[in-house]
Amino acid sequence: MKYILLLVFAFTSLVYSQELNCKVTVNFEGLPVASREILKDFSQIIEDYMNKTKFLSTPWDGPKIECNLNIYFLSVSDETKFTAQVFVGSRRPIYKSTQNSQMVSIMDNTWGFAYLKGQALYANQSTFDPITSFLDFYAFLIIGFDADSFNKLGGTPYFTKAADICNLGGSSTFSNGWLKTNSSYNKRVLLDDILNEKYRPFREAYFNYHYNGIDLFETNPAAAQIAMSTVISALEAIRVKTDLNSVFVRTFFDAKNTEIIDRMKTYSDKEFFNMLKRVDPGHISKYDEVIKK
């Protein structure tokens, strides 16, 4: 079945040299009028960078990954130094379904950079730039999660590249957001979690959740539910041994909680949602609603 799915995805798409199909929106209503003028073409410049940059050195086989960046400007200083929060989302197709599976759903509140009107953006992954490195980081994160869903631990090379960007950012003059903090979301902590051997069983179950679960749900929902449950079982096993207060785990459930509820609400194992509440207390009220029904 695994090889059949790979062939289906291959033959229903072209081979693309670039990896992303990214839609960018910008909101700068909170900024002075003069600053808005500087940013007039910003959304198109960012969108062009995300959609025209070749992030990988190897060919990209398959459809471009559908994703979006929603940028909300927060402040400006010295006329050219901006801070913004960014929602990052990405999706991947589900086999034999018109629906997509949400892969990334992140709100990053810590983007700071200097920008001049009409400034050109150049891709250079060996040096840190507060604009392009931020975009590169999320491109690799999006590609990494997509790859992990089709191949066991397939996203490791891309997560490693994202971690390298974190290291560069942490030693830059725009280090806010790139250094470790105790905030609910932190780029550096997220990548440390993803690449930590402790979470390897979670990542392996993440592949099973998608490839043998989500992708087979339309044709065999009972078997798909069993495969999907493995990711929660893996997290429960980790929780028993150690604290599960992980940015990686929270990021997973922020993207997946609705999808899990929709597909697992008829699951025969009634203990599933109680276990789910233990590993994802952030969405406990949603799971309680399912249990009460």
Image (cartoon, rainbow, N blue to C red):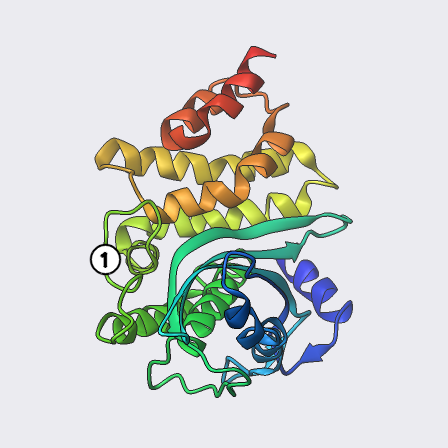
The foreground one among 105 and 274 is 105
- Residue ID for mark 1: 180
**Nearer to the camera, 193 or 232:** 193
Instruction: Check the image and name the residue furthest to the front.
Output: 33
Question: Where the C terminus falls, by quadrant?
Answer: top right
Snapshot quadrant of residue 79 = bottom left
**Residue 181 in the image: above or below residue 137:** above
Residue 224: horizontal and vertical position, in percent? 62, 38
Would residue 84 be found to the left or right of residue 196 on screen?
Answer: right
Q: Determine the residue positioned at 41% across, 76% down.
A: 80
Q: Which residue is drawn at 66% across and 64% down?
A: 6
Looking at the image, residue 97 sits to the left or right of residue 233; the answer is right
Residue 260 appears in the figure: yes
* Residue at figure coordinates x 37%, y 75% from the top left: 130
- Residue lying at 47% horizontally and 40% vertically, measured from the top left: 253
Q: Is residue 211 visible?
A: no
Kindly give the residue lying farthest to the top in the view shown: 292
Q: Residue 143: x percent and y percent? A: 52, 67
Please tell me whether residue 234 is drawn above or below residue 119 in the rendered image: above
Q: In this view, does 220 lie above or below 85?
A: above
